[in-house]
Amino acid sequence: MDDKRIIKVFVDDDPEPFAAFSPPAKFLFDTTRLPDGPHTLKVVARSSSGQEGIRIIPFEVRNGPSISVVGLKENDVVDSRIPLTINAYGSERSDLFVVTGSETPKAIPAWVWALLIIFIAWGVFYLVMYWDKGMI
């Protein structure tokens, strides 16, 4: 009996498979040839009786540098001029670590400012309530 089992692997909407294996298949999927963004991996497997099964797996490729934008979020409604800070960093060189530009500066969160104001207000209250007039 001839073994008709085969696994074909397609990327996105390409009509030609980029790989075909006899099961079980184990391979190294090189995503460096794909552009960054959403993609789909379609696996078509045929059993020894000729029945086909399909599995579609959506995935996202992010081989390029990581891009961070401070000052604009997705679906923000903006007007006039807005200050933006854009940083891009990746792993181009593994033998050198650059400290400047490695982190994206972010604003101090509002809850930190609120805690600081509460602490200062408590200090002023304590100073006023327990100030010894004779110390002057």
Image (tube, grey):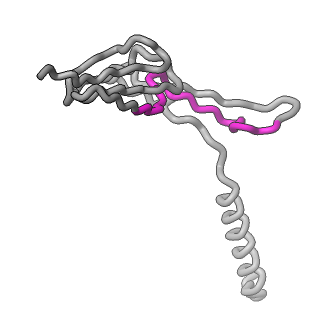
Q: How many marks?
A: 0
**Where residue 23 sits: x, y (%)?**
20, 28
Range drawn in magenta:
55-77
Q: Position of residue 31 (x, y in %)?
A: 38, 21
**Residue 95 appears in the picture as rendered:** no
Q: Is residue 68 magenta?
A: yes
- Place residue 125 in its image quadrant: bottom right
| Residue at horizontal 67 percent and vertical 65 percent from the top | 115
The foreground one among 114 and 136 is 114
Residue farthest to the right? 80
Q: Is residue 40 above or below residue 133?
A: above
In screen coordinates, is 46 left or right of 129?
left
Q: Residue placed at 56% from the left, 28% from the top?
A: 67
The furthest residue to the left? 1
The N terminus sits in image quarter = top left
Q: Is residue 32 visible?
A: yes
Q: Position of residue 60 (x, y in %)?
A: 48, 30
Magenta stretch: residue 35 in it?
Answer: no
Horizontal side of 31 relative to 119 (left or right) equals left
Measuring from the top left, give residue 122's x and y in whole percent: 71, 75
Give above or below for 21 relative to 131. Answer: above
- Where does the C terminus fall, quadrant-wise? bottom right
